[in-house]
C-alpha cells in the first residue's frame, strides 16, 4: 500500500450523524440554558478553555452530576500545579456509575476470554456483587483513604473490585499479572496497601501462567498488608494449600446487601496509577474522584459520542490507563465489553469477531493492532459483521495516515475514525474525536473541550503548522492531585512543569493544524512506551544492571510515524566479557521475567561507555534524537558532559543505523 499523505480529507459526518451527536445536544443546551451561541467548534473550544468556571459548571449541570454536598466555588485556585476544583463538594465515582443501574436485564458488562465464551453481567447483578464485596472490605477494617492493591487481568472481577473499593472511600491501584515480580513490587511497596486482591494465574496466547508463587512472594514483601484476597482463575476454587490465610474472592461477592456508597470530597483520592520518568522508581500518580468523573463524562459523551444505548469495547490490558478509560464507559451508562487474552489467537480476526459478538457500537485499540492487521493483509469486513459499529478509536502511538485508509477500505467506508492522545498522567485526553468535524488522514480531529493544548517552540511560544512540545496552559480537573511520597511536590513539578513553569509539558511532539486538528509525532522525552504501556528507563536499568557482567546500560525507545518502533539497549560489559548470544539471552530473560515480554528490546548492542552529563545523568534524550536523525551538534553540548568522547561511538553507530532504516522504509 502506498503511503498516504497527511491531511487528506477522508470522511465527513452527514446531517443525520450530526443531528444524533451528543455534542449537538450540548451546544443547543448551552444556547437555551446559558444564552451561549457559537459559530463553530473552534469558538466553542476557545470559550471552554477561557471561561473555565462557566465551562466546567456547564458539564456538572448538563450531565446532572449530583454532589452530596454542594461546592463553595468552581475553581478556587487556578495555579498549576495546585489548582483547587469544587471545594466543599462531595460525591463518589461509584455513585455516578450506579445512577444507570436498571431493573431490567440490560448488561453493564459483556466479557469473554481465550477460555470463556461471551457472557454478561447485568447492572443490578453488578451492583449486588459490588455491594457484597464492599461490605466485606469494611469488615476487614478498611477505612476511607486506605489503599487496596490489585494484581488482576482485564476481567469482570477487576471491575467489581474497583467499584467496591472506591465505593467505601478506599484508593484503588491495579497492575496486570503479566508484569514480573520486580515491577509489581516497585509499585505496590510505594503505596503501602492494606489489602491485596490477586489472581492465581492467567491464560494468554494459549499458555497457562501460574502466578501463585509470585503472589505469595509479593504478599510477603508488603509489610502493611493485612488481608490477601485471591481470585481463583486457574483452579476455580481457592487452593488453601497455597494460600492458607487468604480470602476467596468468589465467596465475598455473593451476599445480598444494599450498596452503601460513601460520599467523599471532590479531591478525595480515587486511584493510584503509575508513570515513569527517566530516573528513579515508577511515579505513583494520585487522581481524585471529582476530576475523573468530570473528565470521563465529558470525554465519553461529547467527544466519543457514548451514552446508555452504546456498547463500548476498548481492547486493552489491565496494565494500561485505557483499562480505566474502558471502565469509564459505565459513568455514562454504556455497556462495556471486555476481552481478556491475545488479540492474535487463533488469528488477528479474534477481536473483530468479538466486536460482532458483543454488537459493539464503539471499538478502540492501540495503533499497533491496526498496523499489524494492515500488514497481515486481513479485511475485517470479511471476517465479522461490523454494521453496528459507528466509530473506531486508536491511541498508544501515532496512527499512520495509511492506517486510516486501511480502516476505511477494509472495515467500512463510512466509519468514523477517532484517534485520541492523552495520558496516564492526567487520566484524560488532550486531543481526540469530534462527531461534528471531518476526518483527515493522520490527524486527530480537535483539541478537547476544557483542554488548553498548544504546541510550544523552544522559546515557549505557541505555534501552528509547526511541530512543537505538547503543553496544556490551563488546569484540568483530572490533573494529578499529587504524587505519593513527594514532599513539597518537587517530583511532580520536575515531571511536568520543569521546562515551562506553570504550564503542563506532556512530553509529546505535536503539530496543531490550521483547521484546529492535531498530529502527534511520538515522545519528546526518554520514557519507554511499548505498545501503549509507559515505563521509565530506570526500570529497565534496574533489571539489566543486576546482571553481574553488565556494568552500565542505556536504553532508547525510538518512535517513527508509520513504521514500527525500535527499542535499543546499549550495554557496557565487564572487562574481558563480551556480549555474546548467551549474554543476550540472559539479559532478555531478565527483562521478560522481571518486567514483561513487551519490554524486551529490538536490539542489544555493546558500547564502550554510556554518555553522561557532568552531574552523572545518562544522556538518553540526546542519543534518542541522534538516532532519529538529528545532527550531533544539535543534540548534545560536549562541554556539559563528563565523557564527551563517548559521543563519537554513537555518531558512527547512528550513521549506520539510519542508513539501514532508510533501506527498510
Image: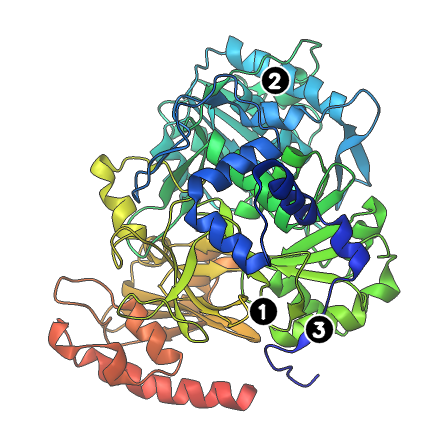
The residue closer to the viewer here, 608 or 630, is 630
Contact, mark 3 vs mark 2 (Cβ under 8 Å): no
1 and 2 marks in contact (CB < 8 Å): no
The structure residue drawn at horizontal position 75% and vertical position 21%, both measured from the top left corner, is 124
Can residue 52 be seen here? The reply is yes
Q: Position of residue 204 (x, y in %)?
A: 66, 49
Q: Which residue is mark 1?
A: 443
Question: Percent position (x, y) of residue 506?
Answer: 39, 57
In the picture of the structure, the residue carrying the numbered disc 3 is 10
Rendering colour mode: rainbow
The disc, 1 or 2, on the residue closer to the chain's N-terminal end is: 2
Q: Residue at x 83, y 47 (%)?
A: 359
Where 295 falls versus 158 (above or below)?
A: below
Q: Where is 12 relative to 315, above or below? A: below
Residue 297 placement: quadrant: top right
From the image, tell me which residue sits under label 2. 133
At mark 1, the secondary structure is loop
Between the residue at mark 1 and the residue at mark 3, the CA separation in whole angstroms equals 11 Å
Give the mark nearer the N terminus: 1 vs 3: 3
Q: Is residue 231 visible?
A: no
Q: Quadrant of the N terminus?
A: bottom right
Among all residues in the image, which is located at the extreme front?
A: 35
From the viewer's perspective, is 519 left or right of 580? right
Amino acid at each position: 500500500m502506498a503511503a498516504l499523505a497527511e491531511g487528506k480529507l477522508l470522511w465527513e459526518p452527514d446531517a443525520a450523524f450530526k443531528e444524533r451527536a451528543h455534542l449537538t445536544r450540548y451546544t443547543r443546551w448551552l444556547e437555551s440554558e446559558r444564552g451561549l451561541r457559537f459559530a463553530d467548534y473552534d469558538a466553542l473550544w476557545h470559550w471552554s478553555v477561557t471561561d473555565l468556571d462557566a465551562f466546567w459548571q456547564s458539564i456538572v449541570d448538563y450531565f446532572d452530576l449530583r454532589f452530596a454536598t454542594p461546592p463553595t466555588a468552581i475553581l478556587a485556585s487556578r495555579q498549576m500545579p495546585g489548582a483547587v476544583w469544587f471545594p466543599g463538594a462531595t460525591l463518589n465515582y461509584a455513585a455516578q456509575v450506579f445512577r444507570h443501574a436498571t431493573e431490567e436485564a440490560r448488561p453493564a458488562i459483556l466479557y469473554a476470554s481465550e477460555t470463556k465464551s461471551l457472557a454478561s453481567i447485568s447492572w443490578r447483578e453488578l451492583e449486588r456483587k459490588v455491594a457484597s464485596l464492599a461490605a466485606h472490605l469494611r469488615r476487614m477494617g478498611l477505612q476511607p483513604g486506605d489503599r487496596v492493591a490489585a494484581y488482576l487481568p482485564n476481567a469482570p472481577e477487576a471491575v467489581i473490585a474497583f467499584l467496591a473499593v472506591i465505593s467505601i472511600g478506599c484508593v484503588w491501584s491495579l497492575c496486570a499479572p503479566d508484569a514480573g515480580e520486580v515491577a509489581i513490587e516497585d509499585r505496590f511497596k510505594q503505596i503501602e496497601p492494606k489489602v491485596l486482591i490477586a489472581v492465581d494465574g492467567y491464560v494468554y496466547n494459549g499458555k497457562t501462567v501460574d502466578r501463585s508463587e509470585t503472589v505469595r512472594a509479593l504478599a510477603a514483601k508488603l509489610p502493611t498488608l493485612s488481608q490477601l484476597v485471591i481470585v481463583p482463575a486457574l483452579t476455580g476454587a481457592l487452593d488453601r494449600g497455597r494460600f492458607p490465610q487468604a480470602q476467596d474472592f468468589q465467596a465475598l461477592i455473593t451476599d445480598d446487601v444494599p450498596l452503601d456508597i460513601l460520599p467523599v470530597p471532590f479531591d478525595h483520592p480515587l486511584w493510584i496509577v503509575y508513570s515513569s520518568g527517566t530516573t528513579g522508581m515508577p511515579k505513583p500518580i494520585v487522581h481524585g474522584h471529582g476530576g475523573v468523573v468530570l473528565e470521563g463524562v465529558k470525554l465519553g459523551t461529547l467527544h466519543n459520542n457514548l451514552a446508555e444505548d452504546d456498547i463500548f469495547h476498548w481492547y486493552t490490558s489491565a496494565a494500561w490507563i485505557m483499562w480505566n478509560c474502558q471502565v469509564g464507559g459505565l459513568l455514562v451508562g454504556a455497556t462495556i465489553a471486555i476481552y481478556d487474552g491475545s488479540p492474535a489467537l487463533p488469528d488477528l480476526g479474534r477481536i473483530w469477531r468479538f466486536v460482532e459478538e458483543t454488537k459493539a457500537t464503539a471499538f478502540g485499540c492501540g495503533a499497533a493492532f491496526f498496523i499489524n492487521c494492515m500488514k497481515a493483509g486481513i479485511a475485517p469486513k470479511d471476517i465479522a459483521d461490523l454494521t453496528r459499529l459507528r466509530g473506531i478509536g486508536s491511541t498508544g502511538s501515532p496512527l499512520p495516515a495509511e492506517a486510516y485508509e486501511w480502516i476505511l477500505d477494509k472495515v467500512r467506508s463510512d466509519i468514523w475514525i477517532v484517534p485520541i492522545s492523552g495520558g496516564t498522567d492526567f487520566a484524560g485526553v488532550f486531543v481526540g474525536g469530534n462527531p461534528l468535524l471531518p476526518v483527515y488522514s493522520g490527524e486527530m480531529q480537535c483539541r478537547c473541550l476544557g483542554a488548553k493544548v498548544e504546541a510550544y517552540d523552544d522559546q515557549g511560544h505557541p505555534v501552528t503548522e509547526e511541530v512543537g512540545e505538547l503543553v496544556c496552559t490551563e488546569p484540568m480537573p483530572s490533573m494529578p492531585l499529587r504524587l505519593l511520597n513527594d514532599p513539597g511536590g518537587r517530583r511532580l513539578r520536575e515531571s511536568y512543569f520543569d521546562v515551562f513553569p506553570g504550564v503542563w509539558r506532556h512530553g509529546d511532539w505535536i503539530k496543531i493544524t490550521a483547521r484546529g486538528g492535531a498530529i502527534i509525532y511520538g515522545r519528546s522525552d526518554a520514557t519507554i512506551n511499548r505498545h501503549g504501556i509507559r515505563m521509565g528507563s530506570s526500570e529497565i536499568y534496574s533489571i539489566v544492571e543486576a546482571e553481574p557482567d553488565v556494568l552500565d546500560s542505556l536504553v532508547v525507545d525510538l518512535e517513527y510515524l508509520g513504521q514500527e518502533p525500535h527499542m535499543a539497549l546499549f550495554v557496557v560489559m565487564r572487562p574481558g566479557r563480551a556480549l555474546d548470544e548467551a549474554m543476550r539471552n540472559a539479559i532478555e530473560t531478565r527483562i521478560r521475567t522481571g518486567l514483561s515480554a513487551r519490554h524486551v528490546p529490538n536490539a542489544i548492542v555493546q558500547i564502550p561507555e554510556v554518555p553522561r552529563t557532568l552531574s552523572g545523568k545518562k544522556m538518553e534524550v540526546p542519543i534518542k534524537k541522534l538516532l532519529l536523525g538529528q545532527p550531533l551538534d544539535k543534540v548534545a553540548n560536549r562541554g556539559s558532559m563528563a565523557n564527551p568522547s563517548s559521543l563519537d561511538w554513537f555518531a558512527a553507530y547512528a550513521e549506520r543505523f539510519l542508513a539501514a532504516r532508510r533501506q527498510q522504509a
